[in-house]
Image: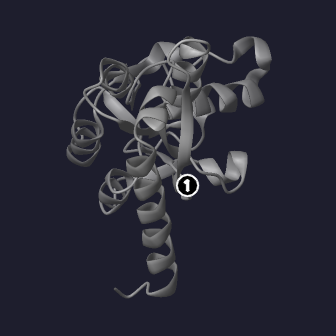
Amino acid sequence: AAVNDALLSGSIDIAGAGVGPLLTIWDRTHGKQNVKAVASLGNFPYYLVSNNPKIKTIADFTDKDRIAVPAVGVSVQSRILQLASAKQWGDAQYNRLDRLQVAIPHPGAAAAIIKGGTEITAHFGNPPFQDQALANPNVHVVLNTYDLLGPNSPTVLFATEKFRNDNPKTYKAFVDALTEAAQFAQHDKGA
């Protein structure tokens, strides 16, 4: 939500967030600011992790558990939980786990999972936070987005149509630099 607000206020020119926030802002700005995707920011799975050994699948969550996500109902993590819930319990119960979700930024959520002892028993994060949590032997993966959706691009970049039209050279330079960086990373993984 904060990223979308920053983009619409002109505080930032290009936003980076999950597909959920992109689809939300695209829908809300269609015919106005016309926010559109620029590019994928990477292909990697997101993990729903837990420090509760009783939680092996999403069906194991109880009313005592809290699942940290960046934004309840609109973040890509929250939307993926809804998709997994629909698959588990049927379309009518797609939002079954929404009541257990709490909006906590990734750094705080990862710290809570690593430390333990809080009401937060799960975190649906992204790299590097999910990797930091998994370094703790008491933390395990409950859901891997690749298992649910196959390989995908959960993080995307997006901008307003006005920014693209008013700044064609800057926009092209950004896309060219992003392409160059992706090619560099693919061809020289050591560096």
Label 1 neighbourhood size at 10 Å, few (<14), some (14-19), many (20+)?
A: many
- Please identify the quadrant where the N terminus is shown: top left
**Horizontal and vertical percent for residue 179?**
50, 66
Q: Quadrant of residue 107?
A: top left
- Compared across the picture, whether 69 is left or right of 78 comes to left
- Depth check: give the residue in front, 145 or 62: 145
In the orientation shown, which residue stands out farthest toward the right?
Answer: 90
Q: Quadrant of residue 82?
A: top right
**Horizontal and vertical percent for residue 186?**
52, 79
Q: Is residue 111 above or below residue 3?
A: below
Q: Is residue 108 above or below residue 43?
A: above
> Residue at point 47% right, 54% down?
172
Q: Is residue 84 above or below residue 1?
A: below
Q: Is residue 82 above or below residue 77?
A: above
- Please identify the quadrant where the C terminus is shown: bottom left
Q: Quadrant of residue 65?
A: top left
Which residue, given by chain and number where applicable, does mark 1 sit on?
A: 45
User: Could you say whether the residue bearing mark 1 is in a helix, strand or loop?
Assistant: loop
- Compared across the picture, whether 178 is left or right of 60 comes to left
> Residue at point 48% right, 56% down?
175
- Depth check: give the residue in front, 31 or 127: 31
Question: Coloring scheme of the render?
Answer: one colour
**Horizontal and vertical percent for residue 142?**
54, 46
- Depth check: give the residue in front, 3 or 87: 3
Kind of residue sitting beneath label 1: Pro
The answer to whether residue 47 of the structure is visible from this angle is yes
**Horizontal and vertical percent for residue 39?**
54, 49
- Compared across the picture, whether 5 is left or right of 18 comes to left
> Residue at point 50% right, 86% down?
187
The answer to whether residue 78 of the structure is visible from this angle is no
